[in-house]
Image (tube, helix red, strand yellow):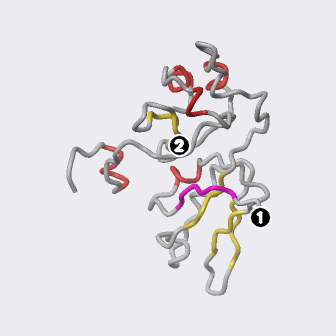
Amino acid sequence: MSGPMSRRSLFTRRAAKAAPVGFRPPWSIPAFDRSCDSCGACLSACPDAVLVKDSAGRPVLDFDRGGCSFCGDCATACLPRDGRPAAIDRLVSPADTLPLIAELGGACISVQGVACRVCGDPCDPRAIRFRPVVGGRVLPEISAETCTGCGVCVSACPVGALTMAPLSRA
């Protein structure tokens, strides 16, 4: 492992990452990359501190830091500039959801037989349910209908078994 390691990374056994490549904030307009001037107002306005700069200096969600509470402060801070529309606009996409869903990976300790329900505890819409199986174990199941894409489960997972993926509406 190269480079400095943060205290959080040390205790969660996650290595420090390069600039994130991720998902745009909620209410991002379709022409986000043309409209965002990388001013950083949304980053400083985010009370959840889940918005970080990508390699181009534009905001992306970093779910390792926590989940989005859909408070709207990023949209309030994003203003039209120089004839460009606001890059984050609640009127364009009024739903308090992201087109994402949590995906469970093979590192899940519950799948491996260890009792764990940590990801389900912070999930407000209760999109993560635990199905009992033979032997006293429970397996997490994620509901596409109730998952808001907030990502709070990703940061809660002690082994990093959850990721966010685009929600396919097929």
Residue 128, position in %: x, y?
Answer: 68, 61
Q: Quadrant of the N terminus?
A: bottom left
Q: Foreground residue, 126 or 16?
A: 16
* 48 displayed left or right of 9: right
**Where is 15 relative to 133, above or below?**
above
Residue holding disc 1: 170
At a point 66% along the width and 87% down the height, the residue shown is 134
At a point 72% along the width and 43% down the height, the residue shown is 97
Residue 120, position in %: x, y?
Answer: 64, 57
Residue 36 occupies quadrant: top right
Residue 142 occupies quadrant: bottom right
Mark 1: secondary structure: loop
Residue holding disc 2: 66
At a point 74% along the width and 28% down the height, the residue shown is 90
Q: What amino acid is labelled 2 in the image?
A: Gly
Magenta-span inclusion, residue 88: no
